[in-house]
């Protein structure tokens, strides 16, 4: 494995690590009282399909 391949793989791994960590930060800091849930839209969508 060449040096360039190692750098590329480390960059890809770093990107995925950043994505996972940002998602975990989002979930752990979510305040349900401060934001309206998207699940309220499901009731309207079900009524429109019926």
Image: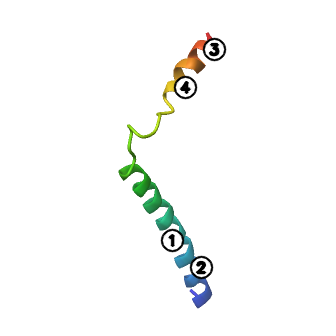
Residue found at x 47% / y 34%: 36
Q: Distance between the residues labelled 1 and 2?
A: 9 Å
Dot 4 or dot 2: first in sequence order is 2
Tell me the distance, in whole angstroms, between the alpha carbons under discs 4 and 2. Answer: 42 Å
Sooner in the amino-acid sequence: mark 1 or mark 3: 1
Identified at 59% across, 79% down, the residue is 8
Quadrant of the snapshot with the C terminus: top right
Residue contact at pointers 2 and 3, CB within 8 angstroms: no
The numbered mark, 4 or 1, whose residue comes first in the sequence reads: 1
Neighbours of disc 1 within 10 Å: few (<14), some (14-19), many (20+)? few
- Determine the CA span between mark 2 and mark 3: 48 Å
Please indicate whether residue 2 sits to the left or right of residue 14 in the image: right
Q: Residues within 10 Å of mark 4 (few under 14, many from 20)?
A: few
Residue 41's mark? 4
**Circle nearer the N terminus (2, 3):** 2
- The spot of residue 41 in percent (x, y) is 55, 26
| Mark 3: few/some/many CA within 10 Å (<14, 14-19, 20+) | few
Residue behind mark 1: 13
Q: From the top left corner, tell me how far across and down residue 6 is, in percent.
A: 55, 83
- In contact (CB < 8 Å): disc 1 and disc 2: no
Q: Mark 2 points at which residue?
A: 8
Judged from the image, the secondary structure of the residue bearing numbered disc 2 is helix
Tag 3 secondary structure: helix
Q: Which label belongs to residue 30?
A: none
Mark 1 element type: helix
Disc 4 to disc 1, C-alpha distance: 36 Å
Marker disc for residue 49: 3
- What is the secondary structure assignment of the residue under circle 4? helix
Precedes in sequence: disc 4 or disc 3:
4
Left or right of 31, for residue 9: right
């Amino acid at each position: 494995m060449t040096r360039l391949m190692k750098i590329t793989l480390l960059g890809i791994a770093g990107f995925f690590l950043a994505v996972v960590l940002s998602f975990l930060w989002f979930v752990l800091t979510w305040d349900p009282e401060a934001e309206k849930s998207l699940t309220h839209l499901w009731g309207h969508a079900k009524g429109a399909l019926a």
